[in-house]
Image (cartoon, rainbow, N blue to C red):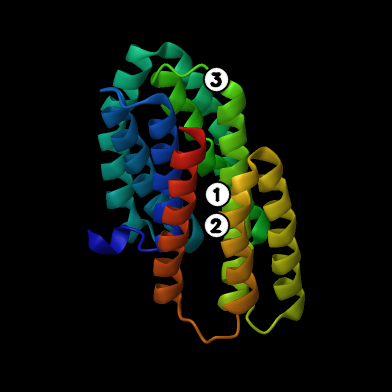
């Protein structure tokens, strides 16, 4: 089954960081365990499902799609039984997943718009985490959501300048300008956020053109994400 488990480091960071951020802000509760397991299994479900749509190879991707779907079903039922209103969160996610399906169908899943749709979907997970944890300071949660979106959108641009668009100067300058803007935006929320977002800006300036491959780029992103998470813990929790 390993071939049906995505190995993109960036995707795993997007899966985990919003959860850990929400968990740190609201405090851990028992309900967070089935919530995260359900989120993880649904993510594992989407990988073969989208590959099935992209390739049309039902004989290869049907089994893992059905398996992960079957595992997620009792978890979804339990969460909805525990808090029925969480079903509306699932409804809100459907348009974003529909867009992912569309780009898989036309075999352009690397398109920026598709990346941004996935980023919004992943980052939004902070809301059910905080909600089920009993959090009430939604203004701060909104700020954290915005910061996560800004970070991951910048990462999507930056990774393209290192890998697929490494020879495209327009992508490079767009990435640098974007990181400069979000550094200022982050500092307007919390002045000390200037520091981690300055590190991200320097990353966007210095690392493209260094011949980095996909694996070290992904591992480095895990380190940058850890730095950002540590900043959240210091400044928000």
Category of crowding for the residue at label 3, using alpha-carbon neighbours closer than 10 angstroms: few (below 14), some (14–19), many (at least 20): few
Q: Which tag is nearer the camera, tag 3 or tag 2?
A: 3
Q: Can residue 99 be seen in this view?
A: no
Q: Which of 10 and 72 is in front in this view?
A: 10
Which quarter of the picture shows residue 33? Answer: top left
Task: Name the side, left or right, on which 106 lies relative to 188.
Answer: left
Tell me the residue at 42%/12% (across/down). Answer: 84
The crowding category of the residue bearing disc 1, from other C-alpha atoms within 10 Å (few below 14, some 14 to 19, many at least 20), is many
Residue at (56, 48) in percent of width and height: 119
Tell me the distance, in whole angstroms, between the alpha carbons under discs 3 and 2.
37 Å
What residue is disc 2 on? Answer: 104
Question: Along the line of sight, which residue is nearer the eye, 217 or 73?
Answer: 217
Expressed as whole percent of the image width and height from the top left, the position of residue 80 reads 37, 17
Give the residue pinned by disc 1. 101
Give the SS element for disc 3. Answer: loop
Question: Does 37 appear above or below 206?
Answer: above
Q: In this view, does 87 lie above or below 10?
A: above
Mark 2 and mark 1 residues within 8 Å of each other at the beta carbon: yes
Alpha carbon separation for disc pair 3 and 1: 34 Å
Choose the circle earlier in sequence order: 3 or 1. Answer: 1
Residue situated furthest front in the rendering: 192
Above-or-below relation of 208 to 17: below
Q: Which residue is drawn at 63% across and 74% down?
A: 161
Q: Which one is earlier in the sequence, the residue at label 3 or at label 2?
A: 2
Which x, y percent locates residue 91?
A: 54, 26
Residue 97 place in picture, x, y as percent: 54, 42
Q: Is residue 167 left or right of residue 73?
A: right
Q: Name the residue under label 3.
A: 137
């Amino acid at each position: 089954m390993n071939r049906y488990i995505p190995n993109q480091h960036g995707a795993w960071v997007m899966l985990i960081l919003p959860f850990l951020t929400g968990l740190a802000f609201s405090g851990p509760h028992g309900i967070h365990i089935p919530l995260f397991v359900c989120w993880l299994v649904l993510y594992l479900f989407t990988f073969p499902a989208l590959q099935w749509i992209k390739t049309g190879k039902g004989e290869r991707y049907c089994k893992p799609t059905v398996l992960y779907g079957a595992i997620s079903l009792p978890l979804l039922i339990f969460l909805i039984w525990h808090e029925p209103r969480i079903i509306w969160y699932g409804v809100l996610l459907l348009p974003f997943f529909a867009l992912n399906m569309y780009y898989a169908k036309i075999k352009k899943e690397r398109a920026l718009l598709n990346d941004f749709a996935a980023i919004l979907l992943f980052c939004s997970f902070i809301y059910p985490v905080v909600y089920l944890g009993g959090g009430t300071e939604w203004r701060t949660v909104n700020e954290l959501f915005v910061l996560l979106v800004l970070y991951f959108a910048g990462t999507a641009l930056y990774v393209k300048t290192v890998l697929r668009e490494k020879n495209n100067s327009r992508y490079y300058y767009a990435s640098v300008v974007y990181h400069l803007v979000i550094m200022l935006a982050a500092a307007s929320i919390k002045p000390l956020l200037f520091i981690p977002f300055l590190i991200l800006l320097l990353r966007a300036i210095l690392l493209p053109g260094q011949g980095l491959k996909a694996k070290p780029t992904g591992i480095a992103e895990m380190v940058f994400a850890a730095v950002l998470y540590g900043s959240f813990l210091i400044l928000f929790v």
